[in-house]
Amino acid sequence: MNQFLDLALSLLTSPRQAMLHITNEEKLKESFFIWLFVVFLLSLSLFQQGPGLVMQFILLVLCMGAALLIHSAVIDYISGFWGGMGTARGITAGFMAAALPMAFSVFFTFLAVIGADFLSGIGSFLVFIWSFYLDIVAIGVNYRFRPGKSFLIALTPYVLVMIFLIALMFIGVAAAVEGIANMQDVQNIESVISQI
């Protein structure tokens, strides 16, 4: 337990050294406990009437766990493609540990509940930036990249998701236009048939 707390404190005080320790030694167990603690706090802050706290926690673990594994796999592939020398276990441990700032988002959720939406929004944005910074550090120390290259690699999954969503939107608009065009043809055929 002492090692777990030391690791969490070092993530706050010296994130680069902590990430170097986590990724190089593949501290999956310690990182998993940090991540699980954060998910538990998030499930408490998002708790509403419905399926219950335990079910909500399990669903959050499954959803966030799947997102974590997919994110780690994509980053590992892209980093390997660009000559990175790290491991998938190291980056997964780094990303789990990088979730630590999200534990502070609980306070901002409570601020939103009491009506301080502006402060809640600013706080949530700062937590996201902090967590993204830790992701960049994890990529840099795990794959031995410079900060600029780590930043670009960290942005790549978000850019790919945006391109995918834009492509889906384009396909949807094209399908709607095609459907409207076919509908007018059908109306023309119906008017010809009704005249006969």
Image (tube, helix red, strand yellow):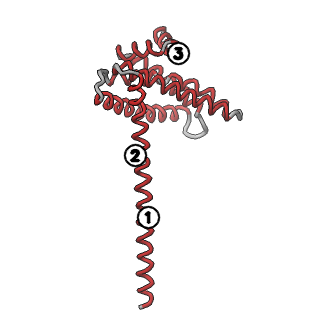
Label 3, label 2: how far apart the Cα atoms are: 35 Å
Count of numbered tags: 3
* Tag shown at residue 164: 2
Q: Which residue is mark 3?
A: 12
Q: Position of residue 70 (x, y in %)?
A: 37, 34
Q: Is residue 83 above or below residue 188?
A: above
**Dot 3, crowdedness within 10 Å: few (<14), some or many (≥20)?**
some
Specify the amino acid type for callout 2: Phe
The quadrant of the picture occupied by the C terminus is bottom left
Q: Position of residue 189 (x, y in %)?
A: 41, 81
**Dot 2, crowdedness within 10 Å: few (<14), some or many (≥20)?**
few
Specify the amino acid type for callout 1: Val
Q: Position of residue 64 (x, y in %)?
A: 45, 33
Of the image marks 1 and 3, the number of the one nearer the N terminus? 3
- The residue closer to the viewer here, 29 or 167, is 167
Q: Which residue is mark 1?
A: 177
Mark in front: 1 vs 3: 1
Specify the amino acid type for callout 3: Leu
Residue at 44 percent across and 90 percent down: it is: 195
Q: Is residue 156 above or below residue 6?
A: below
Q: Quadrant of residue 149?
A: top left
Q: Position of residue 58 (x, y in %)?
A: 47, 32
Residue at 36 percent across and 20 percent down: it is: 142
Of the image marks 2 and 1, the number of the one nearer the N terminus? 2
Label 1, label 3: how far apart the Cα atoms are: 52 Å
User: Secondary structure under badge 2?
Assistant: helix
Q: Is residue 66 above or below residue 131?
A: below
Q: Quadrant of residue 127?
A: top right
